[in-house]
Image (tube, helix red, strand yellow):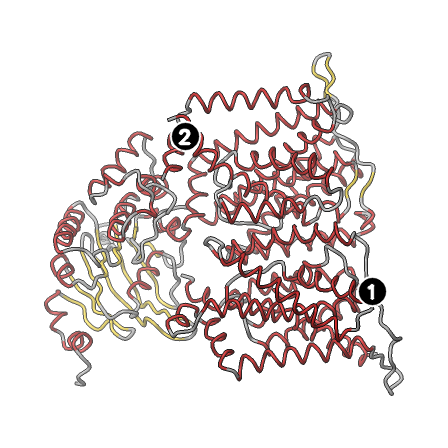
């Protein structure tokens, strides 16, 4: 199979792929100056990178074969955790966001305990149903969470002073963009290294044949737990960041089907089995939706995502990433 | 100290198993010594594979215990049992379909054995194992592209990669040519000479009789005969089970 | 009061069963997880709403139109899902999830986020017992749901076609070997599913507010009942529907409307954990 050999080949980077990667990196670095600085294109790309991180976090589960429809539970818990800590504790957002992530990770542990035996479609259904638990509790615990009114007045990400230079993420969209770019790159490299490590191989064996993996010495239960914790923690962090970006959280906003769906769509479109797939999906699809479709259909533009998921699974189930890799291999050999 | 002579490789003590209230195995008791080769024969569905699953921790017995080298391993998780030195092959091969044959074997080396070697040494070791089962030329192919008999050999290589001391072979010879069976016999004998203890399930009496020290016949939930291959095959219970239901 | 509660719960339960039968048949026969089931219900609800509002069509006319439309939609869906790559259950789940996103947003585009309901033509009718309200809609729902459920039950149990369908549910491969045209059975299951959704939609538009994002709840109810009863078991679905109706009404009565969704989600999770074999009989068998 062509794609198989391509996979081997790219491990030892070809000149073409190095050139493409550096060109891509420079493009992303200079994006704010290429477009109107801080304009809609810059903001759309910021959010695309943000959703790329969300998709990467989701894809950790998918790498293990667990297709989740309920990641918005982690997202919402992260958002609420960070927002409420800021509201009651007046802490720095950069401190509360990881704490929100830990709250998400805690729910991930609960998933592991409760859904330990579920795989495939039953797991997906259970994850979908599990969203309602934190959502309804937060919705009804009005004295603490303000119920369906939500938490408002959440402070934006606090500025950081580097020497004499002030990085103000709340006010300056270009600074925010670069924060997201750095965060995404860091996460992406971490993800790539993790997948190539033994741990990554263990995750892969569980996806391909769990019984065989167990009888070859892979600790399936522990690896599943680690995967859920990582994925939930990162999704929770994304939720926390989102709360500070928006300045408000409410149950319907952060526990929405849309947030569960987006990372799934982006990962499937970009390629679930490549480390860069989710990010690729995000930077292609999200701006397409926000910039092009949103102006055409102000309401209901997200129909694009549904359409894309159906088309991708029917036509090239491996996703864009695998397809591109094949092209790249053909071009470089 | 001297009184505690090395415990036998594997002891099964009164194993019983069943699904949905229907008993499948009852009171299986067996002791297997070191470097012994024991084969299980019996009609389809009698529970031979289930017995393997119980030993490997993929199924929990209703009653009884599995003792491996003096340690009770009943109900431990499969990966723990694998790391203690029990490896198995599957009757219906379970390769990792998207990985190459080499990577399939490497997984066994990485996760199965207790100590980790050098990255280079691992690759050499994996290739050596593929040589042993005659799959080296397929090292770069994907698991899903192999034929059934190649998959069976991959199963053996992968199991050996975990550096086992007890190896369970579930129908490795089914569907092999006579020449391949002769090779399998040689391989099994050389493995035993290398220090392995083997449990084998096979319908090929040519294979089992040639290599086995003992034969265990399972019939209707129970062990009906245990002993030297010739004795077991000539025992009336086995004759009845295999050749017809002529009532005694 | 208690009697009123029971009547409401019974009506709700019968309706739930009507929604679930289509889902269950499709899942059982074709192993396709149709997460867009609730969206189909909504679509036919909207259809009924607009037919009733703009053309003043009576229910007797709306029902056949809605049933035929949904039949057509379901057959289109069958053509789409037929080609889904392996693993079939999970991939159909993901694809129909995509369909959910597509339909939700399309409905948002077409019908806006306003809540709509078909207003009852007459005021709530009063039965002789003065404490018991039994609205015309409730009678309609109870009657139609039970009639449709009964018809499907008879079809499955009494006809040759039903036998073939049940055989396919139990083991598709064996049914094929026995000379049953499994492809036709797939079409039949989707067709029946479509007809049932088409029956349920106009009723839904009369009892609940239509909102583009309201379909998932109906799907989850169908999933819950299917796991509870096992695929293709009509009587089980009806009993499950009544139990679920009672539990939900009870939760609303005791804790308030806000907790209703939590109750159904917890029931779903509990059923998934306790009755994994409820989804597909074959899975339980092949599981190691």
On screen, residue B94 above or below A181 = below
- The N terminus of chain A, quarter of image: top left
Task: In the rendered structure, find residue C118 and report the number of the disc placed on it.
Answer: none
Circle 1 chain: C
**Residue A47 figure quarter:** top right
Residue at image location 24% in from the left, 59% down from the top? B171
Which residue is tagged 2? A329
Q: Position of residue C17 (x, y in %)?
A: 65, 73
Q: Position of residue C57 (x, y in %)?
A: 80, 70
**Taking B8 as reference, is B60 left or right?**
right
**Taking A321 as reference, is B59 left or right?**
left
- The C terminus of chain A, quarter of image: top left
**Taking B155 as reference, is C254 left or right?**
right
Residue, far bottom: C128
Residue at image location 42% in from the left, 24% down from the top? A13
Which residue is tagged 1? C53
**Residue C218 figure quarter:** bottom right
């Amino acid at each position: 199979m062509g794609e198989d050999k391509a996979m081997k080949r790219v491990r030892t980077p070809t000149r073409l792929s190095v050139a493409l990667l550096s060109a891509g990196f420079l493009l992303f670095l200079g994006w704010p100056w290429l477009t109107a600085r801080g304009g809609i294109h810059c903001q759309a790309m910021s959010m695309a990178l943000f959703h790329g991180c969300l998709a990467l976090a989701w894809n950790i589960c998918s790498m293990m074969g667990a297709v989740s429809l309920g990641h918005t539970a982690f997202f919402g818990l992260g958002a609420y955790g960070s927002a409420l800590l800021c509201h009651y504790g007046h802490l720095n957002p950069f401190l509360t966001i990881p704490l929100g992530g830990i709250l998400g990770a805690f729910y991930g542990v609960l998933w592991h305990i409760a859904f330990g035996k579920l795989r495939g479609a039953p797991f997906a259904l259970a994850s979908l149903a599990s969203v309602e638990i934190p959502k309804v509790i937060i919705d009804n615990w009005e004295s603490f969470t303000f119920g369906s009114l939500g938490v408002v007045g959440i402070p934006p990400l606090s500025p950081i002073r580097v020497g004499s230079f002030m990085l103000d993420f709340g006010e300056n969209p270009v600074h925010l963009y670069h924060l997201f770019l750095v965060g995404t790159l860091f996460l992406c490299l971490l993800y790539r290294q993790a997948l190539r490590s033994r741990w990554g191989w263990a995750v892969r064996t569980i996806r391909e044949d769990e019984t065989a993996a167990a009888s070859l010495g892979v600790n399936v239960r522990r690896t599943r737990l680690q995967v859920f914790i990582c994925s939930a923690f990162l999704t929770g962090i994304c939720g926390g960041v989102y709360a500070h970006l928006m300045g408000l959280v409410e149950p319907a906003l952060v526990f929405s089907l849309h947030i569960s769906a987006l990372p799934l769509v982006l990962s499937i479109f970009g390629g679930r089995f490549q480390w860069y797939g989710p990010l690729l999906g995000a930077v292609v699809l999200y701006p397409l939706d926000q910039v092009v479709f949103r102006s055409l259909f102000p309401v209901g533009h997200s129909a694009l995502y549904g359409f894309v998921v159906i088309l991708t699974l029917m036509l090239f189930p491996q996703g864009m990433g695998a397809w591109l890799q094949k092209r790249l291999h053909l071009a470089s050999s | 100290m001297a009184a505690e002579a090395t415990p036998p490789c594997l002891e099964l003590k009164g194993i019983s198993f069943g699904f949905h209230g229907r008993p499948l195995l009852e009171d299986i008791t067996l002791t297997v010594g070191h470097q012994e080769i024991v084969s299980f024969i019996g009609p389809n569905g009698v529970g031979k594979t289930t017995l393997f699953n119980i030993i490997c921790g993929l199924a929990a017995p209703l009653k009884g215990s599995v003792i491996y080298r003096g340690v009770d391993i009943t109900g431990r998780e499969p990966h723990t049992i694998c790391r203690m030195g029990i490896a198995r092959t599957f009757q219906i091969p379970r390769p990792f379909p998207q990985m190459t044959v080499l990577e399939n074997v490497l997984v066994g080396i990485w996760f199965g054995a207790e100590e980790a070697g050098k990255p280079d040494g691992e690759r050499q070791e994996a290739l050596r194992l593929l040589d042993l089962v005659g799959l080296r030329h397929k090292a770069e192919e994907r698991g899903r592209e192999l034929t059934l008999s190649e998959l069976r050999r991959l199963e053996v290589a992968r199991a050996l990669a975990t550096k086992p001391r007890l190896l369970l072979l579930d129908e490795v010879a089914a569907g092999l040519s006579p020449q391949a069976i002769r090779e399998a016999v040689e391989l099994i004998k050389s493995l035993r000479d290398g220090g392995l203890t083997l449990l084998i399930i096979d319908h090929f009496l040519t294979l089992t009789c040639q290599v086995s020290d003992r034969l265990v016949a399972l019939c209707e939930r129970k062990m009906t005969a245990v002993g030297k291959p010739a004795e077991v095959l000539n025992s009336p219970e086995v004759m009845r089970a295999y050749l017809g239901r002529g009532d005694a | 009061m208690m009697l009123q509660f029971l009547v409401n719960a019974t009506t709700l339960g019968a309706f739930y069963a009507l929604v679930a039968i289509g889902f269950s048949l499709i899942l059982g026969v074709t192993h396709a997880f149709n997460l867009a089931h609730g969206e189909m219900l909504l679509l036919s609800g909207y259809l009924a709403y607009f037919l009733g509002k703009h053309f003043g069509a009576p229910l007797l006319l709306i029902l056949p139109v809605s049933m035929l439309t949904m039949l057509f939609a379901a057959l289109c869906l069958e053509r789409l899902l037929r080609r889904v790559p392996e693993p079939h259950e999970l991939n159909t789940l993901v694809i129909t999830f995509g369909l959910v996103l597509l339909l939700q947003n399309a409905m948002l585009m077409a019908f806006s986020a306003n809540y709509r309901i078909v207003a009852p033509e007459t005021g709530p009718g009063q039965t002789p017992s003065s404490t018991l309200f039994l609205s015309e809609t409730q009678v309609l729902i109870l009657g139609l749901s039970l009639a449709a459920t009964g018809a499907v039950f008879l079809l499955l149990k009494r006809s040759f076609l039903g036998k073939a369908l049940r055989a396919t549910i139990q083991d598709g491969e064996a049914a094929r070997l026995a000379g049953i045209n499994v492809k036709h059975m797939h079409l039949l299951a989707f067709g029946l599913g479509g007809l049932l959704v088409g029956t349920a939609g106009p009723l839904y538009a009369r009892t609940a507010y239509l909102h583009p994002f309201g379909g998932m709840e109906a799907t989850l109810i169908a999933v819950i009942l299917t796991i509870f009863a096992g695929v293709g078991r009509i009587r089980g679905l009806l009993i499950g529907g009544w139990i679920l109706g009672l539990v939900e009404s009870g939760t609303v009565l005791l804790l308030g409307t806000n907790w209703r969704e939590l109750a159904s989600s917890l029931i779903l999770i509990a059923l998934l954990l306790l009755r994994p074999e409820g989804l597909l009989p074959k899975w339980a068998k092949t599981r190691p």
